[in-house]
Image (tube, grey):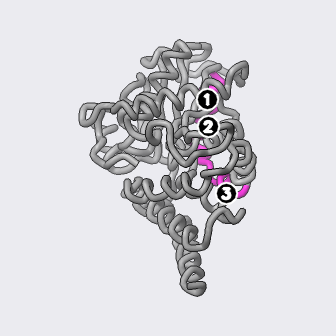
């Protein structure tokens, strides 16, 4: 993942690898949704504007649409299917607990998770991972969708607009989630494949920070969207480059740095977390923390017993 210094678009511009990652993700997203009609009609609210076919909405996934990180939930599902060993599960569990407690991504944790995921899927067929992704969504992700954010996405669909997920998670998993939620499609990290088999490498770099902005820009150009009429939603200051592209940026369950930035620029904020601490410092409700921490402790204890 990108360094925590990516606070504004001016701090660091997109690299060639960011542009490549963004363009690859946009191309994958468009291919997956060709000839798929836009769903939903409804009353005309003040925003989103009904019938504006040059407007769309872009939603970050982790902690914006779904509680926790999709990559870690995917890892749990792969462990259940014996893709890797217990020691890897303990690491995944610890990283997920840290993410939930801290309320933002740690670059080293996310880099480790990404490298692990690439090594795990290397040599497997893309079709196999897509099929498994459907099962993992039902097992670990469906119950973690934030109802409030889901309602925001539905409002755009009801206005006749396209809605895309934009995430550093593998594009195949992101597309499963988008389809299950009834969204238009997804922009995600593109893993290289040859003859339908993963090589263990990425195309460009993970779709994170400036790469997300480049993906949105590329998709908007290809789809004829007017970004000044589009909306974007995220919880993380790492997504300020993406949020700054559109005319309607929203901070959803924001981390402290994004909350501060959003208030300074008068962006709209929504927080669907519960509990006083969640609102103040960006951590989930105590029950959620306890569940994750307990799962982490159990995984680590199991690992120690088997050493």
Secondary structure category for the residue under label 1: helix
Local crowd at mark 1 within 10 Å, few (<14), some, or many (≥20)?
many
Residue 143: say if magenta: yes
What residue is at 36 percent from the left and 46 percent from the top? Answer: 2
Residue holding disc 3: 140
Residue at 65 percent across and 64 percent down: it is 79
Q: Are marks 2 and 1 in contact (CB under 8 Å)?
A: yes
Q: Mark 3 or mark 1, which is nearer to you?
A: 3
Dot 2, how many residues are within 10 Å of its Cα: few (below 14), some (14-19), or many (20+)? few
Instruction: Determine whether, in the image, residue 267 is placed left or right of residue 140.
Output: left
**Which span is picked out in magenta?**
139-159
In the rendering, at what x and y percent does residue 140 appear? 67, 57
Closest to the observer, 88 or 203: 203
> Whole-Å distance between the Cαs marked 3 and 2?
20 Å
Residue 207 appears left or right of 15: right
- Residue sitting at 70 percent across and 34 percent down? 182
Q: Give me the residue at 42% from left, 30% from top.
A: 213
The one nearer the camera, 186 or 293, is 186
Q: Which mark is residue 132?
A: none
Using the image, determine if residue 70 lies above or below residue 39.
below
Q: Which mark is residue 155?
A: 1
Can I make out residue 67 in this image?
no
Q: Which residue is mark 2?
A: 151
Kindly report which numbered mark, 3 or 2, lies closer to the viewer in this rendering. 3
């Amino acid at each position: 993942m990108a360094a925590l210094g990516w606070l504004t678009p001016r701090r660091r511009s997109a690299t060639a690898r960011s542009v490549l990652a963004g363009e690859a993700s946009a191309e994958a997203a468009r291919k997956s949704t060709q000839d798929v009609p836009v769903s939903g009609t409804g009353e005309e609210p003040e925003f989103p504007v009904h019938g504006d076919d040059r407007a769309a909405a872009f939603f970050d996934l982790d902690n914006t649409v779904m509680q926790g990180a999709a990559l870690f939930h995917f890892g749990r599902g792969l462990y259940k299917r014996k893709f890797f060993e217990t020691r890897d599960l303990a690491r995944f569990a610890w990283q997920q607990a840290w993410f939930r407690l801290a309320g933002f991504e740690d670059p080293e944790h996310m880099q480790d998770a990404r490298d692990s995921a690439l090594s795990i899927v290397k040599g497997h067929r893309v079709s196999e991972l897509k099929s498994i992704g459907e099962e993992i969504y039902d097992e670990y992700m469906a119950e973690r969708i934030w109802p409030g954010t889901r309602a925001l996405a539905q409002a755009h669909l009801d206005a006749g607009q396209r809605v895309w997920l934009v995430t550093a998670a593998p594009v195949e998993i992101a597309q499963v989630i988008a389809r299950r939620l009834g969204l238009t499609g997804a922009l995600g990290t593109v893993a290289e494949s040859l003859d339908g088999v993963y090589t263990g490498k990425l195309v460009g770099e993970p779709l994170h920070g400036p790469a997300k902005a480049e993906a949105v820009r590329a998709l908007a150009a290809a789809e004829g969207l007017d970004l000044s009429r589009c909306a974007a939603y995220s919880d993380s200051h790492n997504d300020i480059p993406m949020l700054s592209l559109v005319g309607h940026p929203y901070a959803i369950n924001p981390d402290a740095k994004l909350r501060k930035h959003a208030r300074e620029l008068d962006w709209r904020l929504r927080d669907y977390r519960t509990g006083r601490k969640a609102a103040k410092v960006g951590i989930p409700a105590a029950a959620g923390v306890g569940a994750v921490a307990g799962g982490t402790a159990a995984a680590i204890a199991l690992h120690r017993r088997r050493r």
